[in-house]
Amino acid sequence: MLKPPYSKKLSRSLFLLSGLLIVSGTANAGYSIVRVKCDKNDTETRIFINNEYKGTCPKLDIPVKAGKSALRAQKKVDDEHEQIFVKQLNVVQGVPQRIDVVLGAVELTASAKKARQRAAEKQLRQAAQADLIAARSGDVDAMAQMVQRYTVGEGIAKNLNKARYWQQKRESVLAEMDLAAAKAGNITAMTKLVKRYEEGKGVAQSDEQAQLWRKNIESANAQAELTSAKAGNVKAMESVSKRYKTGKGFEQSTEQAQYWQEKIDEVKQQKVAQAKRKEIRKEIDGISYTRFLEGGMEIISEEENPFAITLGGPLVSASSTLLDVISTPINMTRQVYLSEQLAAHASAWAKPDSMMAKAYQQQQIRNEQSDDPLLASR
């Protein structure tokens, strides 16, 4: 019995011998032998030379005419899938060669690809018909789809004239929608109309109409700012005053411009007055008073008793008692003064030129010039 190495050598020898025998019979016809070998797991793989079926694996010896040829190995996986191996051959007369088939990944068969392509084309045709029906009913999104479909021939025959028709139709419908919204006061729609009339997009080109809608935009913005100004918005007040001064958005009116400027000054002065009152309140809150209780001294604020000072019990020390006696009336006087200021009408600060404001200023000057330390402290 021959050992494996001898068996392999014998196999190669037989291949060469058989090749020689076949070649000897085909040499005159210009052929050569091509041995096709597949993996043991790839049985039933069909072999084609130049699309002509030659048999199935695992092994085939095929006479192939000298020259260039195409070898194709095909293994069926299921009704829609297969594995393929393709190789271009350069066959030399009388020179045998061996091809080891290595199948590729699973893929769709040619017939399955065609079937799926037909199904996809059918879906596109159905979608195109649905878009056409919707476009005819006024759907602007469907109109846009029809422009695309007619431009590239997607689901329908390519037709650039129909593509332009649906583009113009869509712009016309959008222009009607913008006009309706603009008449209802929508500023964004007004802005779109200005551009449409400038470019003649969806409407007849008209510089006059474009200018009309620019004025409408200014009027709408002016009304919005007027509403905000009446609610107390200072920036809106400034804009309204400027509009009345220039006649932009409103009919020009010096009187109205001045009115809103005075409103602005009044609001700003009120803010100054509020800041002043806050400052005074903070100072009042910081003033403390002392009272003597049995066993020592206690500090209390005006929230507890802003004007009451009670002396009682033993003196803590001569120096502290003297300091308290001197400072307490001054602190009380200062608090009374600040409280009067805080209770004063806001116009005392909000309107510095008013009679009330001037009266307070004169009183303050007299107090500062007085020799009375209690008044001077005020």
Image (cartoon, rainbow, N blue to C red):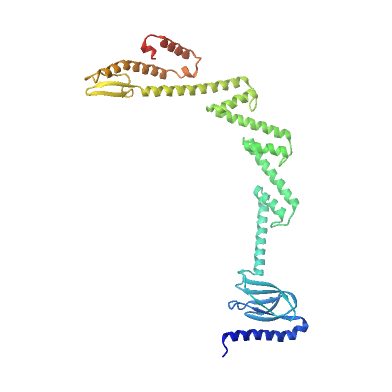
Q: Residue at x 67, y 43 (%)?
A: 174
Q: Residue at x 70, y 34 (%)?
A: 210
Residue 176 visible in the shown view? yes
Give the image location of residue 343, x and y in percent: 41, 19
Is residue 267 left or right of 294 when viewed as pictured? right
Furthest residue toward bottom: 1
Give the image location of residue 336, x and y in percent: 37, 17
Q: Residue at x 41, y 11 (%)?
A: 367
Q: Against 269, is 124 above or below?
A: below
Quarter occupied by residue 235: top right
Total numbered labels: 0
Nearer to the camera, 13 or 98: 13
Q: Residue at x 57, y 89 (%)?
A: 2
Q: Against 195, is 368 above or below?
A: above
Quarter occupied by residue 149: bottom right
Furthest residue toward right: 28
Residue 139 visible in the shown view? no
Give the image location of residue 309, x and y in percent: 28, 19
Nearer to the camera, 43 or 249: 43
Q: Against 47, is 266 above or below?
A: above
Quarter of the picture containing the C terminus is top left
Quarter of the picture containing the N terminus is bottom right
Is residue 138 left or right of 335 when viewed as pictured? right
Give the image location of residue 159, x and y in percent: 74, 54
